Amino acid sequence: MPNIESTKKRMRQSAERRDRNRTRRSALRTSLRKLNEAIEAGDMERVRESWRDAQAMLDRTAQRGVIHRNQAARKKARLSRRISKLASS
């Protein structure tokens, strides 16, 4: 345990941010899982709803620095490719 006040504060801040980021990352994974399940089921109505939520969640987590913006862009590109393939078939 640190003795310096600023280090104690930094530890508190890090713990709070870690918890917040863990919650956001978990929500993102849940959103992506729901979208993947909808794609595998072939239910286009559920896919549209889940896609909107997943896109927003990816953008939000990237904006807040939980994931890298290129990672968010890559995931969106791959998912949109899967969705368009499903829609065309």
Image (cartoon, rainbow, N blue to C red):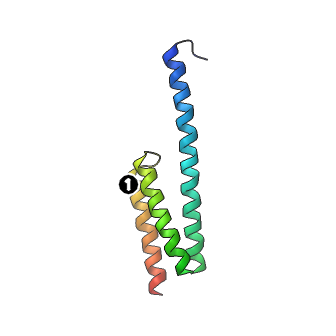
Q: Is residue 64 above or below residue 11?
A: below
At horizontal 55% and vertical 42% (from top left) the residue drawn is 20
Q: Position of residue 49 (x, y in %)?
A: 51, 72
SS at badge 1: helix
Q: Position of residue 31 (x, y in %)?
A: 55, 61
At horizontal 58% and vertical 76% (from top left) the residue drawn is 40
Q: Position of residue 89 (x, y in %)?
A: 48, 87
At horizontal 56% and vertical 69% (from top left) the residue drawn is 36
What is the residue that sits farthest to the bottom in this orientation? 89
Identify the amino acid type marked 1: Asn
Mark 1, Cα crowd under 10 Å, few <14 / some 14-19 / many 20+, is few
Task: Write down the residue under mark 1.
Answer: 70
Q: Is residue 58 above or below residue 64?
A: below
Image quarter where the N terminus lies is: top right
At horizontal 44% and vertical 53% (from top left) the residue drawn is 60
Q: Quadrant of residue 38?
A: bottom right
Q: Is residue 64 left or right of residue 32?
A: left
Q: Nearer the viewer, residue 7 or 74?
A: 7
Q: Position of residue 42 (x, y in %)?
A: 57, 81
Q: Is residue 54 above or below residue 21?
A: below
Looking at the image, how many numbered discs can be counted on the residues?
Answer: 1
Q: Is residue 87 above or below residue 68?
A: below
Q: Quadrant of residue 18?
A: top right
